Amino acid sequence: MDYNRFYLYHSIGTYIKSSILRNFNEGGRPAKWKPSKRAAKGVWHARKKMMIAGKTLIDKSILRNSIKYTVKDNEIIVGTNVKYAKIHNYGGKISKTVDVRPHKRTITKLFGKPISAKDVDVRKHERNMTINMPARPFMVLQKTDIAFITKKIKDYTDNHLGAKP
């Protein structure tokens, strides 16, 4: 691969990756994502000694930091190897059985009527759970991104392959 084409592919790959990271930073583009429960609850900021708003799909930044691109032959591959990326990007239903450990629970109602708070022991058991995960598409290019990539390719063809409009 010649240097100019190598530079073209890497500049496009870098641009696409930065556009995807911007989707995370803005909480979805062009439409905002439905906030996650964790983000809506907020996060304790130790230095500021206050709760601050969390960001959807950004907790430890594992998913965001996993976005990579590679150039292989005549293609640019952009993606992630994180297992849960697909369900977050496309949404869907997750059904599973989980083991619940023994714990204590405080009850304040009995048969729908208020009672004074009482601690009860909950035994170990299994629980069937179904989670409806909303789609939060982060692997999305914007119209401006496509226009930029198209212009880059056109400039390359005009300058290095002698194509004229």
Image: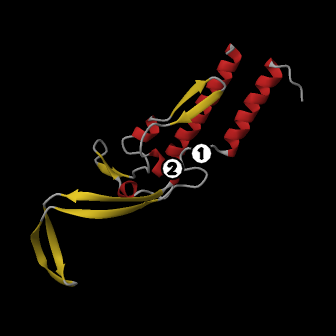
Query: Which x, y percent locates residue 130?
Result: 37, 63
Regarding mark 1 in the picture, which secondary structure is present there? loop
Which residue sits at x=59%, y=55%?
31
Q: Residue furthest top?
A: 2
As drawn, 65 above or below 59: above
Residue of label 1: 140
Which residue sits at x=32%, y=52%?
51
As drawn, 86 above or below 110: above
Asked if disc 1 and disc 2 are in contact, CB closer than 8 Å, the reply is no
Disc 2 marks a residue whose amino acid type is Asn
Rendered-image quadrant of the N terminus: top right
> Quick check: 17 left or right of 118?
right
> Quick check: 5 left or right of 18?
right
Regarding mark 2 in the picture, which secondary structure is present there? helix
As drawn, 30 above or below 105: above
Query: Which x, y percent locates residue 139?
Result: 56, 44
Residue of label 2: 89
Report the number of numbered marks: 2
Disc 1 marks a residue whose amino acid type is Val
How many residues crowd mark 2 within 10 Å: few (<14), some (14–19), many (20+)? some
Which residue is at the front of the view, 150 or 30? 150
How many residues crowd mark 1 within 10 Å: few (<14), some (14–19), many (20+)? some
